[in-house]
Image (cartoon, rainbow, N blue to C red):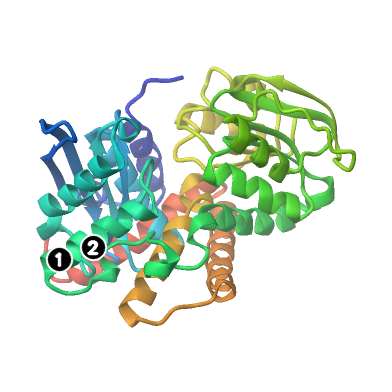
Amino acid sequence: MTTINPFENALKKLHEATTILSLSEQEYIKMSTPEAVLKRTVTITMDSGIEQSFDAYRVQFNSALGPYKGGIRFHPHADLDEVKTLAFLMALKCSVVNIPMGGGKGGIQVNPKELSEAELERLSRAWVRIFFKDIGPKKDIPAPDVYTNPQIMLWMTDEYSKLAGKPSPAAFTGKPAEHGGSEGRAFSTAQGGYYSIRELAKKLAMKPEETRVVVQGFGNAGYHIARIMHNAGYQIIGLSDSKGAVVVQRGSFDPEQLHAYKKENGSIQGFVCDNKDCKCDEHSHITNGELLEFETDILVPAALENQITDKNVDRIDTKVIVELANGPTTPEADAILFKKGVVVIPDILANAGGVTVSYFEWVQNLANHYWTLEEVQDKLKNKMQKATNDIWETKNKYNTDMRTSAYIIAIKRIINAIKLKTINVKY
């Protein structure tokens, strides 16, 4: 795995897109520089009675299109470089799917698995207190991310409401449905990715029943994309979690069976299908690295960043890559894939379903009017289909890859918004 700074990765593609658009140096600086980088210390009393402090972050990258939007992650390796990169990508995602939101991201450097539920609640509420003046329904709306969940968002919303002196459900998204959350939010990242895949499949004449799919990562996004694609008739021939992968030589897996096995055993490792009605046959266990190189038609990295690099890209054997994870492909590998003719649906499109439905939740909270699951999915489908088609047309216009095309569209919208707001003002 490469150790390159993730923000440098993002800036390489930004530079390429801004060069194509012939943007000025000032415009490049505007696109590559966050508007605010906030680093503070959050201190809580542990169950033992001892006070403990943690580094806490919020990066607000660009608000040209609307309020900042982005998740909060609780992770032992969360740092400013990572948070800044994700805030930048969030600004692009919002622009790509054309929702009126900017890019933000936050985090606490902590291992939440080492905290009790009471400590986790105190930490969540403390984060809100130290960033209260920097966030809010019309300024910066956080959401869940790695190791945060609807319960944490509910604690944070409650804390914000207490500090604001009034109910403020629109201050955070990703809440439980019974407390102002949106229908479909739990699997919106995968659902959005599927709508993009379906649109691309039409262009490439890929029939579901003839299309083999490998999914790396069997967390929330990976499980749901496998489930949705299986139900749509795609052949799921490989799946993995952090401990390894399982592939089928003939037929296809039913992801629900592996999901049930993982819930019972903690991993898909050791899975043996004993269902006489199952369509998987001759399956075997391999490593995650081997899974990436398994012959398939669609490869879905849905786990970690920097999985496809210049070290393994020559052995990648697929027609399409769908980046449900953030940053799974390095710039060096990206260029090689383009030369090989592999179509990559980039992360800023493929996983934009999550922020899109978060935006829908925010709209519903502000209006105090809530949509059905069918309404949410219909609106999400329209957004993802339009974005995929726009990117495909831009790709053909500039004879480039889909990632560069997505950057071009996103940057143009943001720069145009900045120009409209700063007309007759030099920056």
220 horizontally vs 180: left or right: right
Which residue is found at the position 32% from the left and 56% from the top? 153
Residue 70 spot, x, y in % from top left: 32, 53
Q: Is residue 311 above or below residue 174?
A: above
Percent coordinates x, y for residue 98 in the rendering: 42, 66
Helix, strand or loop under label 2? helix
Is any part of residue 79 visible from this angle? yes
In x, y percent, where is residue 90? 36, 51
Q: Where 178 sits versus 2, above or below?
A: below
Q: Would you identify the image quadrant in which residue 254 lies? A: top right
Question: 207 and 412: which one is in front?
Answer: 207
Give residue 288's position: percent from left, percent from top.
60, 23
Element type where label 1 sits in the image: helix
**Three-letter code for the amino acid on which mark 2 is drawn:** Asp
Residue 102 to residue 137: above or below? above
Query: Pointer 2: what residue?
Result: 158
Please state which amino acid type lies under the numbered disc 1: Lys
Task: Say which of 418 and 257 sits in front.
Answer: 257
Q: Is 40 left, or right, of 369 in this rendering?
A: left
| Disc ID at residue 204 | none
Towards the viewer: 381 or 56: 56
